[in-house]
Image (tube, rainbow, N blue to C red):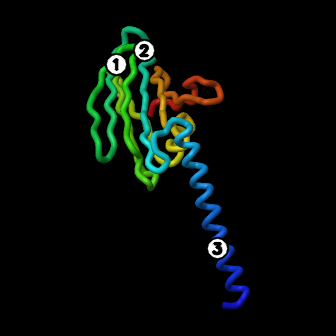
Amino acid sequence: MDSRNVLNCASFVAFVFLGFLAHVREARELVSNGCDSPLYPKMTVYIKHSMGQGVMVDVHCKSKDNDLGNHRLADGRWYRFSFRPNAWFTTLFWCDVSWNGRRQVFNAYGGKGSYWNCVSLGCDCPWKLTPDGPCFFDRKTQKCDICQGWR
């Protein structure tokens, strides 16, 4: 084997080793953030009813493979569910929300963006339902104020 091949082989081994170290560091961060597993973390979606007193809200969340059923919430109450997203970052949970004869849908979890947002919060995905739309928790402001309008 000539010296150029040895150098290419050593460079490749170093590249693979550095990638492995980065993965180990990321895995440690996941566990230290409160995620239960660095390779296959369990996510928990929290949905809080903040539509106002006297308003009952029905929340019905689903994925392609799971129908979590209907849950009736009074003001200030929470509904939560947990799951393990797939390795391809294609897991999607959407929720139908009904109140006062109105029905709207939002994505409670979907894709790589949701994965990293929830991992940064210890694998928690907190939402607050408001009359203007669902709002996700913002680490900077420490409030659920990243809002999307109802569709």
On the rendered structure, is 138 left or right of 2?
left
Give the amino acid type for the residue marked by disc 2 in the picture: Gly
Mark 2–mark 3 Cα distance, whole angstroms, equals: 55 Å
Looking at the image, residue 101 lies above or below residue 12: above
In terms of depth relative to the viewer, which is nearer, 90 or 57?
90
SS class of the residue under badge 3? helix
Look at the numbered discs 1 and 2 and tell me whether their residues touch, using CB distance below 8 Å. no
Where is residue 67? Give x, y as percent: 27, 38
On the rendered structure, is 72 left or right of 2?
left
Where is residue 112? Give x, y as percent: 51, 48
Give the amino acid type for the residue marked by disc 3 in the picture: Phe
User: Which one is closest to the eye, mark 2 or mark 3?
Assistant: 3
Q: Which quadrant holds residue 97?
A: top left
Mark 1 — residue? 73
Look at the numbered discs 2 and 3 and tell me whether their residues touch, using CB distance below 8 Å. no
Mark 2 — residue? 76
Give the amino acid type for the residue marked by disc 1 in the picture: Leu
Look at the numbered discs 1 and 3 and tell me whether their residues touch, using CB distance below 8 Å. no
Q: Please give the name of the residue rendered at 62% of the width and 64% of the height, measured from the top-left corner.
A: 17
The earlier-in-sequence mark between 1 and 3 is 3
Quadrant of the snapshot with the C terminus? top left
Mark 3 — residue? 12
Where is residue 141? Give x, y as percent: 64, 25
